[in-house]
Image (tube, helix red, strand yellow):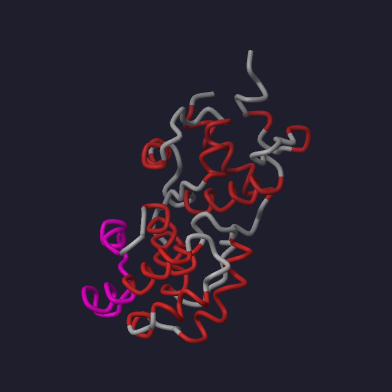
Amino acid sequence: MNKKEIADRATALLELEYPEAICSLQYSDPFQLLVATRLSAQCTDARVNMITPALFGEFPTAEAMANAELSRVEELIKSCGLYKTKAKDLIEIGKGICERFGGRIPDTIDELTTLSGVGRKTANLVVGDVYGRPAVVTDTHFIRIVNRLGLTKNKEPIKVENDLRKLLSPDRSNDFCHRTVLHGRAVCTARKAYCDRCVLKEICKKVNVK
């Protein structure tokens, strides 16, 4: 099988294993997803989901966040890693959305990555989940699994993203990313790969090394 065939097969197998391709972060609108994703850097989604209800209770919109007191945002997200940097970014994100995008969450990766602290991973997630456009979210689980499948030899997120955009079906790429995260947490973990119960073992280069 060539890489495109492996990618298609992996997509089909993961669709069967994880019918609901959902984001683990809890949010109710595009702004909340953007903020939650920024908070998730070097922090678990479970922790972020514990933090955001109080944060969004006080600062539910970009305008509210833009006018927030830095010390209060820091206090609300203190249990999240790198909270001082993230608090500054959240306020700047609010200002950027209000001042440069008229309060609208940008719908392109290029625009989103002009916001403070927003990288391509965050931008891809927003573009894919909010606007339904082809996206490749290269988190650590995704990078690990596509490497084990032999779909790329790269570890740098932008290079992995570019490699996988060539292989994944555009209309299925976003859900594929969500499913690899679920699979990476449950089966193909960083600490140990449970190959005996992995739905991808038939196409996995790690398992089928000659």
Q: Quarter of the image holding residue 97?
A: bottom left
Most extreme residue toward the left, as rendered?
Answer: 100
Q: Quadrant of the C terminus?
A: top right
Q: Which residues are magenta?
A: 94-115
Question: Could you tell me residue 116's position as x and y percent?
Answer: 31, 63
Question: Could you tell me residue 46's position as x and y percent?
Answer: 63, 64
Does 14 sit left or right of 130 as displayed?
A: right
**Residue 108 lies in the magenta stretch:** yes
Residue at the (49%, 56%) spot, across then down: 41
Residue at the (36%, 67%) spot, across then down: 89
Q: Quadrant of the N terminus?
A: top right
Q: Quarter of the image holding residue 38?
A: bottom left
Question: Could you tell me residue 121's position as x and y percent?
Answer: 42, 53
Residue 1, compared with residue 66, is above or below; it is above
Does 87 sit left or right of 17 as displayed?
A: left
Most extreme residue toward the top, as rendered?
Answer: 210
Residue at the (64%, 51%) spot, across then down: 182
Residue 87, compared with residue 4, is above or below; it is below
Question: Could you tell me residue 173's position as x and y percent?
Answer: 47, 49
**Residue 31 lies in the magenta stretch:** no
Does 186 sit left or right of 90 as displayed?
A: right
Number of callouts: 0
Q: Nearer the viewer, residue 99 or 187?
A: 99
Q: Nearer the viewer, residue 50 or 30?
A: 50
